[in-house]
Amino acid sequence: MIPSELAVTYSSSASIYGISTYAAGIAGNVFAFVLFLSPMPTFKRIVRNKSTEEFSGLPYIYSLLNCLICLWYGLPCVSYGVILVATVNSIGAAFQLVYVTLFILYADGARKMRMSALLMGVFCIFAVIMYVSLEYLDHPNRQTVVGYLSVASLICMFASPLFIINLVIRTKSVEFMPFYLSLATFLMSISFFAYGMLLHDFFIYIPNGIGTLLGVVQLLLYAYYSNGSREESQLPLLA
């Protein structure tokens, strides 16, 4: 093969690789957006009734912290070439902040104070992470430290469906595990798993690989137990 042919082949391979990587990241953003929208029925009910009732605000606090840490990891000052991680988590952080704000607005006195304190705690933790990583760490160490923080945060987030999986097995019903939410979780995880693998980014593909496996488990359980469950709850998984 002559040099010009080698150059064309290399250019074509690089182009396919770049398109595949970008496509995986965009797909992850789209499916994540579906997940960010999933609590909306809960908050429509909260606004309509002007009460948080028995709903918990903790999942939205955890999600906000997770999105902020992963957003920080995706920025060029921490990591190069993973900007689609920053875009999806900036959108996610905005959604979670709106949800937390609405929860605080309609919560009773004691819960309002507790949620407000937790929200301030999230901002303080994130500020400390930003300050320490910028002030005391060079770029490679900054990526490593923030990367491990994002992995820990994502694994904790992906572990939350274990409670639902346990409930499904115990009750032999998929009432509290909406199919489309489980499907969106799986598709988002596998998209970002592919994105991380293509970029050879350990901090992206490890937690999303775990999320993919948990997504597969949820879908298999849904297929197994759906025949015995005729009605599916309208409440989102994070309620």
Image: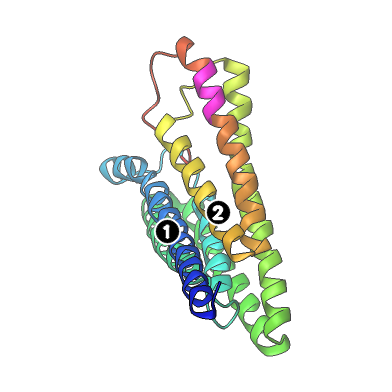
Render colour scheme: rainbow
Q: Residue furthest front?
A: 1
Does 226 sit above or below residue 18?
above
Residue 148 found in image quarter: bottom right
Assess disc 1: are there few (<14), some (14-19) or many (≥20) residues with their C-alpha within 10 Å of its C-alpha: some
Residue that mark 2 sits on: 194
Residue 173 at least partly seen = no
Does 7 sit above or below residue 219?
below
Q: Residue 10, image x and y in percent?
A: 52, 72
Q: How many marks?
A: 2
Q: Residue 202, image x and y in percent?
A: 68, 62
Q: Is 220 within the magenta?
A: yes
In the foreground, 222 or 122: 222
Counting residues from the start of the chain, the first of labels 2 and 1 encountered is 1
Q: Residue furthest top?
A: 228
For badge 2, the amino acid type reads: Ala
Residue that mark 1 sits on: 23
Magenta stretch in the rendered image? 219-224
Q: Secondary structure at mark 2?
A: helix
Q: Residue at x 64, y 43 (%)?
A: 159
Principal SS element in the magenta part? Answer: helix
Q: Residue 1, image x and y in percent?
A: 56, 71
In the foreground, 73 or 56: 73
Q: Is 73 within the magenta?
A: no
Q: Residue at x 57, y 34 (%)?
A: 216
Q: Residue 120, image x and y in percent?
A: 54, 68
In the foreground, 39 or 218: 218
